[in-house]
């Protein structure tokens, strides 16, 4: 099999590469269908999204390309009403902005960690997503929510992920950390 461009993976990045390619291409995908993390698996009539944020974007051109050009209007906008079940109770999502109602010791650990992260920003950029979470939110929020949640969502250890590709999608406190502030800019 010969091709000018070989694209490994039919997720959104691979499909985007093919869409924008001006050359002959071939996509190799190991799954039975394309979509990568952007798909819904159906079991007994119930749909389960593999990843919930995959089409979230703040870029109007990208939203127009996906929603109008590629999907031709075959999508649904939803107003988010998300909750986190933690410590035997529900709290609002995002967790880092909704500590009310958590057990006092957990909320205290989260707030103290956030204050410590604010007072002691790292002197250099974090090595990975886990380091970014600790530097941005502190130990409590990272431990009780941020790291386990993101490991489940992305099916990858936060120690193996780079923070720069997702940090601008995460609500962060404005506490003056040079890396937290930088992560919210393109």
Image: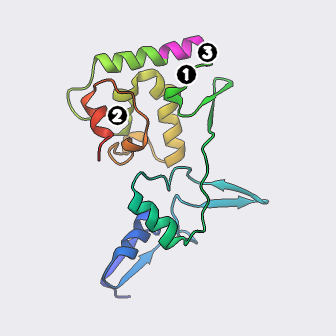
131 w.r.t. 48: above or below: above
34 w.r.t. 89: above or below: below
Q: Position of residue 40 (x, y in %)?
A: 63, 60
Precedes in sequence: disc 3 or disc 2: 3
Q: Position of residue 99 (x, y in %)?
A: 55, 22
Q: Which residue appears at 45% of the width and 28% of the height?
A: 142
Q: Position of residue 97 (x, y in %)?
A: 50, 27
Residue tagged 1: 99
Per the rendered image, the range of residues in magenta is: 104-109
Q: Quadrant of residue 39 in the image?
A: bottom right
Q: Position of residue 153 (x, y in %)?
A: 53, 46
- Residue 159: assigned label: none
Q: Quadrant of residue 8 in the image?
A: bottom left
Label 1, label 2: how many angstroms apart (C-alpha)?
20 Å
Secondary structure character of the magenta stretch overall: helix
Q: Which residue appears at 44% of the width and 53% of the height?
A: 57
Q: Nearer the viewer, residue 57 or 41?
A: 57
Q: Are marks 3 and 2 in contact (CB under 8 Å)?
A: no
Residue tagged 3: 103
Residue tagged 2: 132
- Provide the secondary structure element on which disc 1 rests: loop
Precedes in sequence: disc 1 or disc 2: 1
- Provide the secondary structure element on which disc 3 rests: loop
Label 3, label 2: how many angstroms apart (C-alpha)?
25 Å
Label 3, label 1: how many angstroms apart (C-alpha)?
9 Å
């Amino acid at each position: 099999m010969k091709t000018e461009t070989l694209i490994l993976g039919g997720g959104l990045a691979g499909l985007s590469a093919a869409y924008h390619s001006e050359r002959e291409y071939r996509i190799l995908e190991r799954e039975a269908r394309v979509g990568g993390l952007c798909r819904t698996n159906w079991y007994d009539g119930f749909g389960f999204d593999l990843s919930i944020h995959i089409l979230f974007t703040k870029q109007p051109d990208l939203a127009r390309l996906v929603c109008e050009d590629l999907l031709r209007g075959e999508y649904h906008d939803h107003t988010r009403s998300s909750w986190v079940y933690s410590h035997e109770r529900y709290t609002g999502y995002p967790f880092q902005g909704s500590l009310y109602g958590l057990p006092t010791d957990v909320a205290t650990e989260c707030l103290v960690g956030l204050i410590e992260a604010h007072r002691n920003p790292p002197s250099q950029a974090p090595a990975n997503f886990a380091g970014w979470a600790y530097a941005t939110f502190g130990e409590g929020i990272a431990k009780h929510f941020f790291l386990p949640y993101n490991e489940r969502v992305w099916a990858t250890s936060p120690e193996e992920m780079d923070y720069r590709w997702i940090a601008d999608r995460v609500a962060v406190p404005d506490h003056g950390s040079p890396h937290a502030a930088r992560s919210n800019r393109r």
